Amino acid sequence: MNQEWDIIVVGGGITGAGIFRQSVHLGYKTLLVEQNDFAWGTSSRSSKLVHGGLRYLKQGKIDLVRDSVLERQALLAELPGLVNPLNFLIADYKGQSPNPWLLRAGLATYDTLAGKWDHQWLSRNDFIMAAPHLNREGLTGGGRFTDAQVDDARLVLRVLLEGEAEGGTLESYTKATSPRREGDRTHLTLENSRGRFEVSARVVFSATGAWADQFSEHRPHRLRPLRGSHITFPGWRLPLPCALSFSHPDDGRPTFLVPWEGASFCGTTDLDHNHSLDQEPRIEAEEVKYLLRGLAFAVPHLELQARDIIGTWAGVRPVLSSGKEVDPSKETRDHALWNENGVVTMTGGKLTTFRLMAGEAMEEAAMYLPAPSRRGLFTFAPPTLLEGPVPPHLAQRLSGRYGAMAQQVAECGDLSLIQGSWNVWAELVWACRAERVYHLSDLLLRRTRLGFVLPGGGREHMEPIGKICCKELGWDAHRWKSEMEDYIHLWESAYTVAEGALW
């Protein structure tokens, strides 16, 4: 790391990954450092949607929605198998806001901005056919439209590893502190298990998300960290042919029911997060009760209870603060960019528009950098055509998730599904070999999502997982036991409903 860098990016979530990838694409010598694992923060704990944000139309955010739906279409075209179309149904109930005419107008505007007419209005009977478990009392019909879904952590990995393949340098579990400008370079102190390093670059990007105020201390408290939590059910317990959106009966907030990776989840909440950002965020009892009340309204006949929940997750959004005591849901979801003497901070915004945000960040930093060797935004490597007996649906999935490395993943061995998930065993082998797995939680919460979609966080599969880790990572029996105990403790404290927490 003791080199002369053009650019150092601090933060390994989707914003930092986009800036890293764009800076490498433009020809700059670039280092990215992340204090935890890649995608450890908000970027592995989102609602897994690549969307324009239909509700932002109501707020008059036309430009934001237009940019988002156009990027959604671009990502669908470039990343089939990772970013996939997702049908949404949005229910209309008698006397509920917004009224059906306003909702129809919103759907029409949404598709017009995307340049793709792909919605329809369903009668009550047709809506019931499409969503047979939905509450029918007061239902008048509703709209059907298309957005997209993504494995957020895998998107981050895909962006980072393609940037590394093009010449960038990545370091996880490396903490950056003390940014300071000296002459025409910005200096940082980096610290990891190998020691302490003093490094410098022409410009440093802070893509630290909810930690932005801590990293850049000159003008703190610009952010309002908000927690969004989700609860997960087995797919058979909450069967969803497509995603559903409804207004929560408590406060009218949009609430989603979404099928994902063989499971189904309900989310999200929107609350001030008043806990330390250095601890894993976790759902609180009142949030679980809130989401269960939403489910009791939306799908009452399923009679879902806390005991049916197989997992949870909570993410902290780096939302810009208005400085006023307003409802969290009314704070802007726009991104912010500021330049403080060689430290350019990008925070807020949406996962969907990460590539546009990266381009904007690089334009802001142009004053510190020589002219780029290339122009325009980066694109992804084209889909890989796999050789050998790989089923077509799996071939597309591996191509989307791993890009140019998909063939090597397929050659890692067992392509059978891990029971209860959409992952295959070969993916665990590849992750251990090639994707910087340092802890079991890296493997089960971010390289794969087994900890999100399997009961017990995947505990029933620990024996074969342990064999893979010990062989590929060189762990002995003592290291494996320690990693497994740490992972189970973490999962029980931050990724499930604690026993007795609701009573």
Image (cartoon, helix red, strand yellow):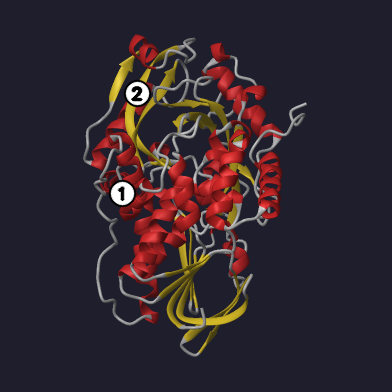
For residue 328, which quarter of the picture?
Answer: top right
Q: Residues within 10 Å of mark 1 (few under 14, many from 20)?
A: many
| Residue 376 higher or lower than 281, as above or below | below
**Image disc number at residue 346:** none
Residue sticking out furthest to the bottom: 183
User: What kind of element bears circle 2?
Assistant: strand
Question: Which residue type does callout 2 highlight?
Answer: Gly
Who's the residue at 59% across and 80% down the image? 197
**Image disc number at residue 143:** 2
- Front residue (pair 348, 25): 25
Who's the residue at 28% across and 62% down the image? 377
Who's the residue at 63% across and 33% down the image? 456
Query: Picture coordinates of residue 39 (x, y %)?
Result: 51, 54
The C terminus lies in quadrant: top right
For residue 323, which quarter of the picture?
Answer: bottom right
- Front residue (pair 183, 472): 472
User: What kind of element bears circle 1?
Assistant: helix
Query: Picture coordinates of residue 224 (x, y %)?
Result: 60, 53
Question: Does the rendering let one see residue 333?
Answer: no
Query: Picture coordinates of residue 355 (x, y %)?
Result: 35, 57
Q: Residues within 10 Å of mark 2 (few under 14, many from 20)?
A: many
Q: Is residue 44 left or right of residue 49?
A: right
Question: Which residue type does callout 1 highlight?
Answer: Glu
Query: Picture coordinates of residue 270 (x, y %)?
Result: 58, 40
- Front residue (pair 457, 41): 457
Please identify, in this view, whether the residue under mark 1 or under mark 2 is nearer the observer.
1
How far, Cα to Cα, is label 1 from label 2? Answer: 22 Å
**Image disc number at residue 71:** 1
Q: Earlier in the sequence, mark 1 or mark 2?
A: 1
Callouts 1 and 2 close, C-beta under 8 Å: no
